[in-house]
Amino acid sequence: MHESSQTVDVDFVAIRYLAGGGDPAWITVPLHRACGWSHGHDPLMPRVILSSPDQKTLLRLEPDPEGQWWTIHHTAGPDRPAWYASFGARTPVEIIAAFTDALTDPAGHPSTARTPFELLDAAGWSPPDHSAGMYRSPDATTFVETDSGAWLATTMLGRKRPVWQARFSEGTPLHLITAFTAALADPAPLLRATSPSGLPTLNPVLISRARQKVPAVEVASALEDRVRALAARHKAPAAAPPALPRRPSADPGHTR
């Protein structure tokens, strides 16, 4: 990232589900500092483990070349079975954050939430060949499907090049999956460093990169702004996180 004393060069990448993973601190730091999730300290292990204040939900971020890097497990309750969600390494953190932000929202389940497929339909996604239980992105790289209560989102580059996958078990609260699909289909670009190494493709037919100079203080403060916005929800439920997340600077307490 080229920078001066006042501005930094960044890329705004669209389509967002091909923007690469981004900085995991965008998720882990607010969970800890704004939502009260606790974490252990194990400097010998390249992983992050966070548990919710009520000890019912566990988030694990662990590099796994053979599987999902992000996993969230929630214990069973009196009226709901246990459930889990997982996300591949190249799932954009802003899309995962939509799920965790909904999970930690003290306002709870929104009574007027639309279904995951309704949001995709409104965003121009369509069932491939009128397939029941599946929707496809307009560029045909990403699919969202459901079967027997479980949900699966997959981004592919061709038939044999999976980019990332998100999995939601049966019993995952529907409003959390809806928050995920809303972020997935959002046309707003994601901010990334100018190095293309983190992007799964540079194909201009599939993605666009608009390079801009952004005030350095704005990039540096983005994570703090997000933490404050999420913390404010516990005092004023009507408060909302920033509409367009910006890539935060590295957090000294974060490991990957």
Image (cartoon, grey):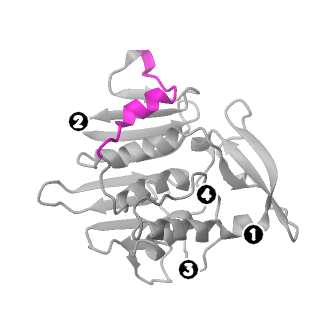
Residue drawn where x is 50% and y is 57% of the image: 65
Spatial separation of the CA atoms under disc 3 and disc 4: 17 Å
Mark 3 and mark 1 in contact? Answer it, CB < 8 Å: no
Q: Quadrant of the C terminus?
A: bottom right
The residue identified by callout 4 is 22
Q: Is residue 118 left or right of residue 246?
A: left
| 78 relative to 53, above or below | above
Q: Judging from the image, what secondary structure is the residue with disc 2 in?
A: loop
> Closer to the N terminus: mark 1 or mark 2?
2
Residue span colored magenta = 111-129
Q: Quadrant of the N terminus?
A: bottom right
| 21 relative to 141, above or below | below
The residue identified by callout 3 is 253
At label 4, counting other C-alpha atoms closer than 10 Å, the crowd grade (few under 14, some 14-19, many 20 or more) is many
Residue 142: in magenta span: no
Q: Amino acid at mark 2?
A: Ser
Q: Amino acid at mark 1?
A: Val
- Residue 41 place in picture, x, y as percent: 44, 84
Spatial separation of the CA atoms under disc 4 and disc 1: 19 Å
Q: Quadrant of residue 18?
A: top right
Residue drawn where x is 24% and y is 39% of the image: 149
Q: Quadrant of residue 151?
A: top left
| Residue mark closest to the camera, 4 vs 1 | 1
The residue identified by callout 2 is 148
Q: Amino acid at mark 3?
A: Gly
